[in-house]
Image: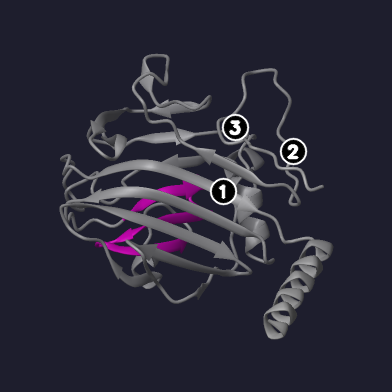
């Protein structure tokens, strides 16, 4: 029976001296970020066992839950060293039928400053999920990169409202959806990672993310928020499982014909 690993510590990072996380492409992984005000470390909100620079402001929103928004003029940054499954999962889905899914709710106020929501590989390389002037985008390279505009979908967020966003990466392609509308599939491309293994396992949330800043030169909070953010990885189905599924479907079709 296929085992499922809920990677509660894989993304969060582990305390000093804990066992180093080991990636296994045949396992399932999932993580939901806890943005609640009670999730604190060293006086900072929302630190998941790693380190944080600057701060997020939390806000409890009716029918949404706890949201975060920019806490100071330089944006916010979370990082995890050595224990994140994100780097390995992205490598796997770029070349196989395994699937990586990122979901979140995003309150968009129309700020025309497109940067990343989640960036994996924080030293000027890696992968960034974000927006380009209100359109969903996915880019390889730095957190501040013109490739956002080149790699955006035709899906635009609704202004001054909560938007449900989903990114799906599988078999070398990525798609995105906003409020149930899905984009065409696009190629992920070859991911360039930093040579330092500590760098490729870092990730950030909201560092100059769209809406944290009011413009390319402005540093004012424009009211955009992130809530209900989670990510999951599902491996390629085992051949035996896939065969059994096909046999079950065939049997069902035969039964319907006889009926």
Q: Quadrant of residue 169?
A: bottom right
Q: Which residue is rendered at x = 23% and y = 56% of the image? A: 113
Distance from disc 3 to disc 1, alpha carbons, whole Å, reads 11 Å
Task: Give the SS element for disc 1.
Answer: strand
In the rendered view, would you say 4 is above or below 193? above
- x, y percentage for residue 150? 38, 72
For mark 1, does the 10 Å Cα neighbourhood hold few (<14), some (14 to 19), or many (20 or more) residues? many
Q: Position of residue 105 (x, y in %)?
A: 33, 48
Taking the image as shown, residue 54 lies to the left or right of residue 95, namely left
Q: Which residue is label 2 attached to?
A: 22
The quadrant in which residue 6 appears is top right
- Which mark, residue 8? 3
As for residue 235 lying within the magenta part, the answer is no
Q: Name the N-terminal-most of marks 3 and 1.
A: 3
Q: Is residue 125 magenta?
A: yes
Q: Is residue 90 left or right of residue 17?
A: left
Task: Identify the residue position indicated by label 1 in the image.
Answer: 232
Residue at the image point whose x is 26% and y is 29% from the top: 57
Gap between marks 1 and 2, in whole Å? Answer: 16 Å
Query: Sequence-wise, which precedes: disc 1 or disc 2?
Result: 2
**Displayed quadrant of residue 68:** top left
């Amino acid at each position: 029976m296929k085992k499922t690993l809920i990677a509660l510590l894989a993304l969060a990072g582990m305390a000093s001296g804990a066992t180093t996380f080991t990636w296994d492409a045949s396992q399932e992984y999932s993580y939901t970020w806890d943005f609640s005000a009670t999730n604190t470390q060293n006086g900072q909100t929302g630190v998941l066992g790693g380190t944080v620079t600057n701060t997020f402001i939390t806000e409890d929103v009716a029918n949404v839950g706890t949201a975060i928004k920019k806490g100071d003029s330089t944006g916010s940054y979370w990082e995890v060293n050595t224990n994140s499954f994100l780097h390995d999962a992205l490598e796997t889905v770029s070349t196989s039928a395994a699937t990586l899914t990122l979901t979140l709710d995003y309150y968009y106020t129309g700020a025309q400053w497109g940067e990343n929501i989640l960036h994996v590989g924080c030293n000027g390389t890696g992968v960034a999920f974000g927006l380009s002037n209100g359109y969903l985008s996915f880019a390889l390279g730095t957190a501040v990169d013109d490739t956002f505009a080149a790699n955006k979908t035709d899906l635009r967020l609704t202004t001054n409202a909560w938007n449900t966003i989903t990114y799906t990466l599988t078999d070398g392609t990525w798609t995105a959806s906003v409020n149930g509308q899905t984009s065409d599939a696009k190629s992920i491309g070859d991911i360039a990672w930093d040579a330092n293994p500590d760098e490729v396992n870092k990730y950030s949330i909201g560092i100059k993310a769209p809406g944290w800043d009011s413009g390319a030169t402005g540093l004012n909070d424009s009211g955009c928020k992130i809530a209900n953010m989670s990510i999951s990885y599902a491996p390629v189905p085992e051949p035996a499982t896939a065969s059994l599924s096909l046999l079950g479907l065939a049997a069902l079709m035969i039964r319907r014909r006889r009926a």
